Amino acid sequence: MTLELFAMWVLVGLLAGWLAGVVMKGGGYGVIGDIALGLVGSILGSWIFRTLGVSRGAGMLALVFVAFIGAVLVIGEGRALGRGRRGYARA
């Protein structure tokens, strides 16, 4: 992996995490946490689409879309797990 490719991956993950945080309003991890989860989500989204056989040669918009889908999944799961832990601690 080249430095340029790594920098692009990080920027796409940051953008996807921020967009996912904006779309999924209502509590959560805040801007920094959502961006960090967006980075993880971009890896997940890339893996999911690659497993489904979707070509990644579609351009920058496709990269952002794939990372956004992964970020939404990771942020949603993180929020669901976080709510479960808080509810368990109170009981």
Image: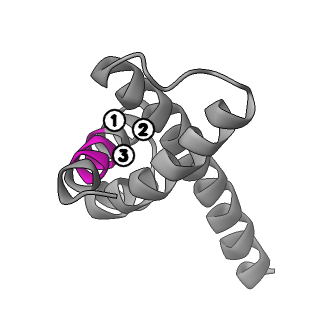
Q: Which residue shows up at 66% across the image and 73% down it?
A: 86
| Tag 1 secondary structure | helix
In the rendered structure, which amino acid carries the disc numbered 1?
Val
The magenta span reads 8-15
Q: CA distance from mark 3 to mark 2?
A: 12 Å
- Kindly indicate the quadrant of the structure image that contains residue 83: bottom right
| Residue with the mark numbered 2 | 25
Confirm whether the magenta stretch covers residue 11: yes
| Tag 2 secondary structure | loop
Please identify the quadrant where the C terminus is shown: bottom right
Q: Residues within 10 Å of mark 1 (few under 14, many from 20)?
A: few
Mark 3 or mark 1, which is nearer the start of the sequence? 3
Please identify the quadrant where the N terminus is shown: bottom left
Q: Residues within 10 Å of mark 3 (few under 14, many from 20)?
A: many
| Residue with the mark numbered 3 | 17
In the rendered structure, which amino acid carries the disc numbered 3?
Gly
Q: Which mark is residue 34?
A: none
Q: Which residue shows up at 33% across the image and 34% down it?
A: 19
Mark 2 or mark 3, which is nearer the start of the sequence? 3
Q: Residues within 10 Å of mark 2 (few under 14, many from 20)?
A: few
- Kindly indicate the quadrant of the structure image that contains residue 84: bottom right
| Residue with the mark numbered 1 | 22
| CB atoms of marks 2 and 1 within 8 Å | yes
Viewer-nearest of labels 2 and 1? 1
Q: Position of residue 10 (x, y in %)?
A: 28, 53
Q: Position of residue 50 (x, y in %)?
A: 64, 34
